């Protein structure tokens, strides 16, 4: 629903690309979502002596709990002691117990980013030499389970409630003031307020479990709730609840005193409601801006007001669109949404699109930083989807605008025809309402004469005593009830007739269909936006990868690895003598040529002379492999292969197939970080 948007769309798109290109070309480093950029010991490293502590460095300050960093030995037992400390900047350390034996240790962390999102991860390091470990080198964030799903749904409902509440009120005040008395519009806006209030309360209760344990049973933990109230996110949610109380007063005035005033009297109150409503709406939008991506990183003082404008523009466009849809389908026949209101909303929507383009360009530059982040990061990919949905929405809006123009053209001749018919009406013609009243009075008069026992009375009525006949008051009451019932029936018939005429208008029907299509796209757009606000910005993701590659020992020189990687993998082919251990040595475990040695031993350590072994390497993250390796037999229980090509660094899965007889064989696997 955007007036003149079709001819101006090309200009808006070209402006977006030009400004975005200039900004992305000169992007400066920043971060808006915590990411692990370094550690000591380094990820995947092998140290000679047991460290006394493990240090983690993040891209921005984080919030840590006493249990935020855990270090586990190969058996899964914790070997850290005490709470994490922040010795300097963005580095956090946890002390280790003394006398740690050789083996592979797992470091798991779960912290809260300064922009309110939980961040979790895990990595391994080894003391002396790598060993088997029962701990998976991956961590499930608290926001990944049921609580995380509920929290994400609550965020979506809160955004939807905000859009309907603010956009609906803006549509009524700026475009269709008569809509304040339409019951369907009132229910829509009140539903938006209820949805936002309920979602905010739910987010406040879920927040503690969402950032800590991830357990549904901790939702009503008052201790966690108290901790949440002391955080920036908790303060933002409480502020939102207070502003919603003011919004309730605004709604009461809008649908109370404002709706009951005449058109002339409404003008004075409209200005006051517009100012008050704008302040409340901006405050509600700021409750998101002050606690999420906009509040951290580059130019936070500019980013937060820009984010507020972005949210208000989204609400004015999508919320007004939803209200228009409800008005087109549910407004009563005597109060239809007129073409003037639709055209006003077209102008409002176009202004909202302009604001969205301007603020969207700035946000894209701030959160991405480079063109490559559009395709190489999840945030950029989601942003491309969002941009595509906005383009589709604008295209459908141009169709709606054409239906609006046709509706206006059709309404003008109809109005002229009605005026012409009024001029031809005789001066002594009786208005329809007056004639209906006359007929009702005549019916009441006839009924009154029958009740008075006049000439039309029967002999039985004349013989009846005075006490058995209805008095004048009772008869008048019955006549009034019948007249009221008749009036209601005629009003219902007239309403149904007007609705049929309204629905039969092809222009209005076409407008309703196009607006319905817009609303459907808007629902998907809002869902993508909700996911986008919970996703690590592309700029931060790329910076974290770059920092990790610089700090990783595997990046010391192209094509060189961290040194020989040794994997011990037990197997059991199921036969009577089918148990053993496969040991794989890969040197230098880097990109390019590698030497592979494979040893097969029985459980007692003796060489196992098996008929055949095969090896395959797979990098699932890049959809590479399996790459087959056929080693040559060197001696009993020993196979080797030289020149094993590994094309890319990553977490590779090494599969070994061992055959101990003609029918007994098994395939076992283990992951190894290579390159």
Image: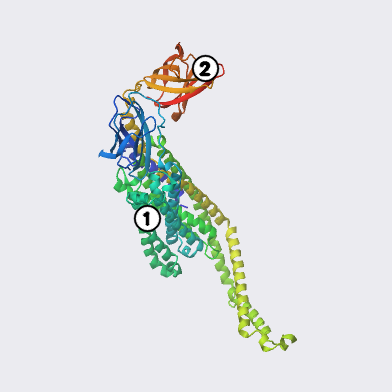
Q: Secondary structure at mark 2?
A: loop
Residue that badge 2 annotates? 660
Q: Residue at x 63, y 76 (%)?
A: 482
Q: How many marks?
A: 2
Q: Quadrant of residue 164?
A: bottom left
Pick the quarter of the image with the C terminus.
top left
Q: Earlier in the sequence, mark 1 or mark 2?
A: 1
Image-quadrant location for residue 634: top left
Query: Which residue is depicted at the point 41% across and 48% down?
Result: 218
438 or 130: which is nearer to us?
130
**Badge 2: how crowded within 10 Å, few (<14), some, or many (20+)?**
many
Give residue 320's position: percent from left, percent from top.
45, 55
Query: Relative to 34, is 490 on the left or the right?
Result: right
Q: Position of residue 355 (x, y in %)?
A: 38, 50
Is there a contact, CB below 8 Å, between mark 1 and mark 2? no
Disc number for residue 352: none
Q: Is residue 612 visible?
A: yes
Query: Can you identify the residue that label 1 sits on?
Result: 240
Would residue 584 appear left or right of 455 to someone viewing this image? Answer: left
Camera-side residue: 502 or 388? 388
Residues at marks 1 and 2, CA–CA distance in whole angstroms:
68 Å
């Amino acid at each position: 629903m955007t007036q003149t948007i079709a001819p101006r769309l090309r200009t808006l798109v070209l402006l977006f690309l030009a400004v975005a290109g200039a900004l992305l070309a000169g992007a400066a480093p920043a971060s808006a979502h915590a990411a692990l950029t370094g550690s000591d010991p380094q990820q995947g490293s092998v140290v000679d002596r047991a460290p006394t502590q493990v240090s983690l460095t993040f891209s921005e300050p984080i919030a840590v709990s006493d249990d935020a960093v855990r270090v586990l030995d190969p058996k899964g037992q914790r070997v850290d002691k005490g709470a994490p400390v922040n010795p300097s900047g963005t580095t956090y350390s946890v002390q280790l117990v003394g006398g740690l034996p050789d083996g592979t240790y797992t470091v798991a962390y779960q912290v809260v980013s300064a922009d309110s999102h939980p961040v979790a991860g895990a990595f391994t390091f080894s003391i002396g030499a790598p060993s088997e470990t029962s701990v998976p080198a991956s961590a499930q964030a608290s926001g990944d389970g049921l609580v995380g799903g509920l929290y994400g749904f609550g965020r979506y409902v809160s955004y939807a409630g905000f859009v309907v509440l603010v956009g609906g009120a803006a549509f009524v005040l700026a475009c269709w003031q008569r809509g304040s008395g339409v019951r369907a519009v009132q229910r829509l806006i009140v539903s938006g307020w209820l949805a936002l209030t309920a979602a905010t309360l739910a987010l406040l209760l879920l927040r503690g479990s969402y950032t800590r344990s991830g357990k549904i049973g901790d939702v009503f933990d008052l201790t966690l709730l108290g901790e949440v109230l002391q955080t920036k996110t908790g303060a933002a949610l409480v502020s939102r609840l207070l502003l919603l109380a003011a919004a309730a007063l605004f709604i009461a005035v809008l649908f109370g005193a404002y709706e009951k005033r005449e058109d002339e009297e409404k003008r004075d109150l409209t200005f006051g409601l517009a100012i008050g409503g704008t302040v409340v709406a901006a405050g509600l939008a700021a409750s998101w801006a002050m606690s999420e991506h906009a509040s951290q990183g580059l130019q936070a003082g500019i980013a937060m007001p820009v984010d507020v404008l972005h949210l208000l523009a989204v609400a004015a466009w999508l919320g007004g669109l939803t209200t228009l849809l409800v008005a087109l389908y549910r407004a009563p026949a005597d109060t239809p949404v007129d073409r003037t209101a639709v055209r006003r909303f077209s102008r409002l929507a176009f202004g909202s699109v302009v604001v969205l383009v301007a603020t969207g360009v700035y946000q894209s530059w701030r959160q991405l930083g480079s063109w490559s982040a559009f395709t190489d990061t999840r945030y950029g990919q989601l942003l491309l989807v969002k941009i595509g949905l906005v383009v589709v929405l604008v295209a459908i809006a141009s169709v709606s605008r054409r239906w609006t123009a046709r509706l206006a053209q059709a309404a003008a001749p109809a109005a002229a025809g009605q005026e012409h018919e009024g001029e031809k009406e005789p001066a002594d013609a009786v208005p329809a309402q007056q004639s209906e009243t006359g007929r009702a009075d005549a019916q009441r008069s006839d009924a009154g004469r029958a009740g008075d026992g006049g000439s039309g009375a029967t002999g039985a009525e004349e013989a009846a005593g005075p006490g058995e006949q209805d008095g004048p008051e009772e008869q008048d009451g019955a006549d009034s009830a019948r007249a009221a019932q008749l009036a209601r029936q005629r009003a219902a018939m007239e309403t149904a007739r007007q609705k049929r005429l309204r629905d039969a208008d092809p222009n209005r029907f076409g407008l309703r269909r196009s607006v319905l299509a817009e609303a459907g796209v808007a629902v998907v757009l809002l869902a993508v936006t909700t996911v986008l606000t919970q996703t690590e910005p592309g700029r931060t993701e790329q910076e974290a990868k770059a920092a990790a590659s610089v700090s990783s020992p595997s990046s010391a020189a192209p094509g060189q690895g961290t040194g020989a990687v040794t994997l011990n993998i037990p197997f059991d082919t199921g036969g009577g003598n089918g148990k053993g251990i496969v040991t794989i040595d890969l040197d230098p475990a880097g990109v390019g040529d590698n030497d592979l040695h494979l040893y097969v031993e029985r459980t007692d350590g003796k060489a196992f002379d098996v008929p055949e072994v095969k090896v395959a390497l797979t990098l699932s993250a890049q959809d590479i492999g399996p790459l087959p390796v056929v080693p040559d037999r060197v001696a009993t229980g020993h196979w080797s292969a030289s020149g094993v090509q590994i094309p890319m660094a990553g977490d590779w899965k090494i599969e070994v197939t061992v055959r101990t007889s003609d029918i007994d064989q098994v395939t076992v696997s283990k992951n190894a970080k290579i390159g």
